[in-house]
Structure formats: C-alpha cells, structure tokens
Image (cartoon, rainbow, N blue to C red):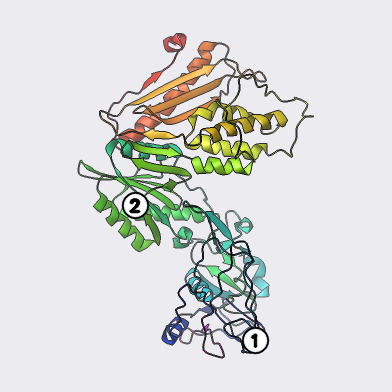
Amino acid sequence: IPINRETNFQEEIAFESQNTPLRQDEEESEAEDFSVEIVNPHGAERPGTPPVQTPSSPPKVMVIPPTPPKVVTLPQAPVNEPVVPPTPSNSPVAGSTRKAFKPLVTKPPVAPRSVKKTGTAILNMGKKLWSTLSRSSSTESDLDVLELSAGDTKQLPEGGIRRKARLVVKGCGQRPGVDYKETFAPVVRYETVRILLATAASMNLQLRQFDVNTAFLNTDLEEEIYMKQPKGYEVQRGNYVCKLQRGLYGLKQSPRNWHKTLKLALTELGFMRCAYDNCLFIYQYGENTRIYIAIYVDDGLMAGNDPRLMDSMLEDLSKKFEMKISPDVKKFLGLEISRDKRGIMVHQEDYIQTVAKRFGLENCKSVGIPLQPYRELDPDPTGASHDPSLEFQEIVGALLFVMRCCRPDVAYAVNKLSRYFQNYEKKHMEAAKEVLRYLRTTRNMGIRYFPSQRDNQLVGYCDADFGSDRMERKSTTGVIFTFNESPLTWLSRKQTIIALSTTEAEYVAAATACKEGIWLKNVLEDIAVVDDPCVTIYTDSQSGMQL
C-alpha cells in the first residue's frame, strides 16, 4: 500500500490478526523477485525516455523505507461505527516524522481479514501477467490501450458479504477481428445439474465441489493486447504501457480461452466430453467406476462412485490451477443442496427470502396458489397506462431464476407475466407480487431426488390450452419430465403458431415434449443411467395421439 507519495519511498503496512512481524531475510528475498523487463517495441531508444535496461541488469522495484518496517495493527472497530484512522498521538508509530495515513474504506468488513503486503502481491502478479513496453508518439494510435476497473462483492453461503478487489480490463474498447475473434464459451445447463444430482441420489454417488481462483489468469493470449499500468504500481513511469501475456477479467475472449484450457486439463486426466452438453465431462474406468463433472465457468460439481479416485483427480487439477475444494456440497449455482438418508433435496429458501425482503414482502400474508385465475392481465393496447417506474422487470427476472432452478409450480404464472415486459402496468406488478408471496409462503419447499430401489424411469407429461392468449390467440404448451417420480425438467411456453383446433395445439405440445425427451434420453444414456431406448410421454388428447 503506497503511503505518502511525496517522499521517495513506499511504505507497506501489514494488517495482521496474529501480530506476527516480518523477518528481514524474507523482505530481502521477496524484494529480489521484483525484476520487470523494460522493452522498447521499436528496437531503439526513443529520445527523451529513460534508457532501456539490458537483460543482464534488470531493474529492481524494491521497497526501501528509511527505517526498519514495523507491523501496525488497527484496532477492531464496532460493526456500526466507521474505522477511525490512528493519529500521531494514538498510533503505534507515534513520535516518528511520517504523516498519518488514511483508511482505504470507511466501513469495516463483515469478518476481519488479514491483508499482508498488498503491493508485493500486485507487483509479483504483474510480473507474470504482463511486460512493460515503451509507447512512442508516432505509433500511439496503433496500440489498443485498455482502461482498468476494480471492485467486487460476493455473497457467502454461510451468510455475510466478502469484499474483494480484482484487476478488470474494460473490454468494451477491444476491436473485433483485431483484439479478439471468437468469444462464445458454453456453460452447463441447469437441467444437466439436476440430472447429475438425481443420478447421485439414485446411484448413491459421492459429491465434490470445487472453485478455481482467478480462473481467467491461467489462460494464454493469442492476440497482442495492451493496457495502461495500474495506478500506484507503475513499474516504469512515463510513456509506457503493459503488454498482456495472460488473460485478464474483462477481455471478451477470456471465457472462451478458459474453457479451452480447462477442457484440455480434463482431457489429459481421461475425461470425455458429453456429446449432448459441452460442459458435462465423463470418466469411465472398467464397467463400474464412473465420475462426472459439470462445469459452469470456474465452478465445478463432481459426482462419482470412487471417492479416492475423485480426490486424486482433484489433487491433480489443483496442481495446475489454484482451487478451493469442498467435500460437503451445500450451494452450487444458486441451488441450495442438502443430503440425508431420504435422498438429495434441492431448494432456494434463502434466495426467496432475500428477494421477498428486497421488495418489502418479508412479512407478507400467505397465499395458497401462485396466481388467481380471475386476474385480468391484458394491457392497454395504447400504452397510456404503462408505468416505467415500477420494478416489474426486476421482480419477474428474480421469479424466472427461481422457476428455472427448482420451482415448476410457478412456471405457468411466471411465463404469463413475462409476456408484458414492454407494456406493464400496476396490475401486472400486483400479480408479480402475488407470485412472490406464494413463493415466500412455500419457501421451504423444493425437489427431492430419492434413492432408486428399482430401474431408473424417465416419464414425460404434456398438455396445452387452446387459444388462452386473447391478444394473439396463441396457445400455451406445458411439459414436465420426472426421473423416478421426481421433477427433472419442465417448461411453460407460448406456442409460436396460431393453432386452429385443440388437436393442433395438443400436437404441437406433444412435439415439444418429444424434443425434450430425446435430449434427456441421450444424456442419461451417455452417463449410463437409463438403458430403455423408449421414453413414455402421457397426453390427454386422443386426437393428438391418433395424429
């Protein structure tokens, strides 16, 4: 942390929870690692710039305080009071000629953390991620220099908020075709995650969860990208920029490069990618040993029947990437997961309570059904009653996430509300709050996947209502598939065509169910869970079945 920039030195203050001073030999050894190569991209020195250092004598960026460094410990402040910076009278270094420093934040963190030698970490990280190049005025327009931003917060599963700083590049300044080419990176579907959890419950598989720290920093760049030096940590002052050697957060190609890097690492361990979900990887050894991994960017969920082999593979991955491994899976991609003798339970109680509190419904009255059938939701066609100040889009977005994860009982109501995103009124907001009140009333409900006592069975159901949309006269399709009598996938969707009869509406719904059933059967066969080549789908339309 640079303190007192007017002087010719930088002072680093370590905030230690255990008050452990640093040894002088550790400071000297770490200071020797601060070698950064300064290179002129044009091969010659530019007039008016510092001379280019040769590789035999690289410049050193060293922390040289005028006196031996001291460990300064800030007193822990109460939660509701701001942090008070120490003054020359109450500071542990009182009596010195140094100026009192200012705190970096005005509010204390939720949990006390130890931040040790921040400047050392950033300079050491920068040595691996970029090299510093001089920028001449004649070629300044040829360099695509990106700005920087930082700051992030994360909600912890056990409660509380963790604040973290992250070096982020503003990728909005990248030029397509020059700074990046392909940007698409797949992620695992929530349906695949539920398939994995249902398989783990039916076959009694062990679960593991891992999270890769700073995943994008493990990728290599194919393009030449430049950015400005981070403020406060300039290796070479003047007209110099940083040439990126590794991927950074904010670059448009970073997610794709990371997926390719992780896929290569899993392939080297013997995993094969599923043909029906690009982020589901399967490992099979013999006839009985199977391990599955679902990847969502830098989060992974592993299920298998060989705990030793699973731990060994995670250990091999941790040698390549810095990872956090948890044998107790409690939360994954917003899904709250609990396991007992009766199987695996998937719910979102905490998230529903958070959303209800956000919209002022934490103490609302209970509701028995998601949406009353007598509600009239047709908007004013002239748009005169449209109120853009309402938080309708935000609340429906939260309801869509809950419905997508583990609540098929609100699928029809949320699908109906989502049709009015462009022309919503007060009555639509009231209907959305009614759905949220129902979720808040039944927040402890979820989906339970039971251990299988017989062969695994995949069964589907489909239905349609004819011409329910009075504005466009289109029908609505409803489909749900169960795995061992537990919901696996579901959807409620307005049909894209105008059906002329109930037979046609039911036939379109059955076709949608068949497409979903074929995909599910292929995934379950690929992971060797279901052997039956046929999928049973039930419908209540005799004419549709005959057709």
In percent of width and height, residue 246 lies at 48, 64
Quadrant including the N terminus: bottom right
Closest to the observer, 282 or 122: 122
Determine which residue is flagged by label 2: 327
Where 528 sits versus 63, above or below?
Answer: above
Quadrant including the C terminus: top left
Q: How many marks?
A: 2
- Which residue: 63% across, 86% down? 98
For marks 2 and 1, give the one nearer the viewer.
Answer: 2
Do the residues under discs 2 and 1 have CB atoms within 8 angstroms? no
Instruction: Name which quarter of the figure residue 418 lies in.
Output: top right
Residue 138 marker: none
Task: Evaluate whether residue 147 shows in this view.
Answer: no
Dot 1 amino acid type: Thr
- Which residue: 50% across, 23% down? 478
Closest to the observer, 517 or 180: 517
Query: Any magenta on residue 375?
Result: no
Q: Which residues are magenta?
A: 54-71
- Which residue: 77% across, 29% down? 383
- Relative placement, left or right, of 537 versus 270 is right
Q: Secondary structure at mark 2?
A: loop
Task: Evaluate whether residue 42 shows in this view.
Answer: yes
Closest to the observer, 325 or 139: 325
In percent of width and height, residue 330 lies at 41, 47
- Relative placement, left or right, of 337 versus 404 is left
Residue 7 marker: 1
In percent of width and height, residue 18 lies at 45, 74
- Relative placement, left or right, of 128 versus 280 is right
